[in-house]
Amino acid sequence: MLIKKNAQIAKPCNQEEILSKVETVKVKTKKFTFFIGIDVSKNKLDYAVMQGTKLLFHEVRKNDPDDILAFCNRLKELPGFTVTKAIFCMEATGIYCNHLISSLKKINGNAVIENPLRIKRSMGLARGKYDKADAIRIAAYAQKNIADLNILAKKRPVILELTNLCALRSRLLALSVALQNPLREQIKFSKKGLQKQSLKLCERSMDAIKADINEVESSIEMLINSDEQLKRLKQLITSVPGIGPVTSIQMIISTNEFKDIKHPKKFACYAGVAPFKSESGSSIQKARISRYANIKMKSLLHVCALNAIRGDHELKAYYERKTITEGKPKLAVINAIRYKLVLRVFACLNQDRPYRRDYERSSNPTANEFVIDQV
């Protein structure tokens, strides 16, 4: 895929334009009549059960698989209640949701995990905060915004295992940095005897952490190679110059094997690459990228863009032309290159082929072929 000479910096997007490109399965509003809002914490779950706009009851139970299934059995005793007519809505709270999600899968429940900020901003002027009120507000949010809810897509066990291994790798790397950075700082500002003593005392810990990191990375590699689908996705993504294995794995995890995010514009928004307009009356500001993004994915794409500038002749020429000749801001050009990398990845995935520099798209692309010029 060649870069056109008249290519421009990524154009500002608006929310309607992005959502119109998204291929998601929305909830059918007529199907659901029961809305269960769940406030999740480490030790307990607050349930608020609504039928339509009417609050039926509130209940507190342990965050335990047996208690969750017992609560679901109680729901089945309600007149007219069936699991297929119920929405179980909760805020994203990390691993504290695991028992709830796994239990709902056993009964084929419809789980919805929403961003806490989205729920908070939908409340209007809300006064006071406690678990019972939060559960009721989550249930009311699900009932009010039913047309915009997305049922949680099931993840394969291999993706759950891969997610856990990558999180463990990140924690080990953070530990390694926390040990090594102070030791480096001591070289210039401490006596040699003290610096050597600290290095000697931490040597075994650093070696152990390094060994653990290598073992985790080997486990990740073995897991990906054991699954043909993951192996193929990684090969296609890493075929794009500048994108390495860590970024490719993070993209697979973040998109649930590109099932939750199927379009590059939505992924660009998710990764904090898409710029958005900021206008109000006569006040018109420059389009800027939003801070509501996956920071980890954004930082990885930034590193990939820098690698691509150094290693890809086309992108290097594009960067020099935009910054030196046209005088564009460097960060704006780097952001445009991040977007180009995203487009290249999705082009390869949608056409199921590795990246080729000399690739030429046919004049009559197939229905499932990604048309790069239309994005």
Image (cartoon, grey):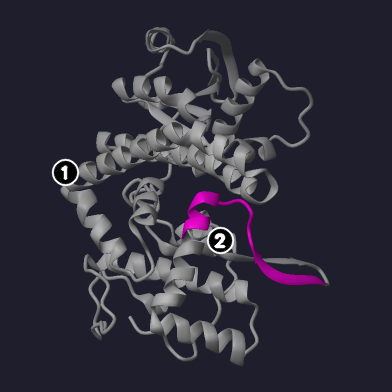
Q: Residue 296: x, y in percent?
A: 51, 50
Q: Residue furthest front?
A: 193
Residue that badge 1 annotates: 226
Above or below residue 39? Residue 114 is below
Q: Residue 189: x, y in percent?
A: 70, 48
Name the residue nearer the viewer: 336 or 126. 336
Residue bounds of the magenta highlight = 283-300
Q: Residue 172: x, y in percent?
A: 44, 37
Instruction: Tell me the quarter of the picture where residue 137 sits.
Output: top right
Asked which secondary structure carries label 2, the reply is: helix
Name the residue nearer the viewer: 194 or 259. 194
Asked which secondary structure carries label 1, the reply is: helix
Q: How many labels were placed on the picture?
A: 2
Which residue is rendered at x = 60% and y = 71% of the image?
A: 12
Q: Residue furthest right?
A: 282
User: Gap in Å between the C-alphas at discs 2 and 1?
Assistant: 40 Å
- Point out the image quarter for the N terminus: bottom left
Which residue is rendered at x = 49% and y = 90% of the image?
A: 6
Q: Nearer the observer, disc 2 or disc 1? A: 1
Instruction: Tell me the quarter of the picture where residue 169 sits.
Output: top left
Q: Is residue 291 magenta?
A: yes
Above or below residue 31? Residue 297 is below
The amino acid on which the numbered mark 1 sits, given as a three-letter code, is: Ser
Which residue is rendered at x = 16% and y = 43% of the image?
A: 226
Tag on residue 237?
A: none
Residue that badge 2 annotates: 16
Q: Taking 69 as reference, is 197 left or right?
A: right
Above or below residue 289? Residue 189 is above
Residue 294 shows in the view = no
The amino acid on which the numbered mark 2 sits, given as a three-letter code, is: Glu
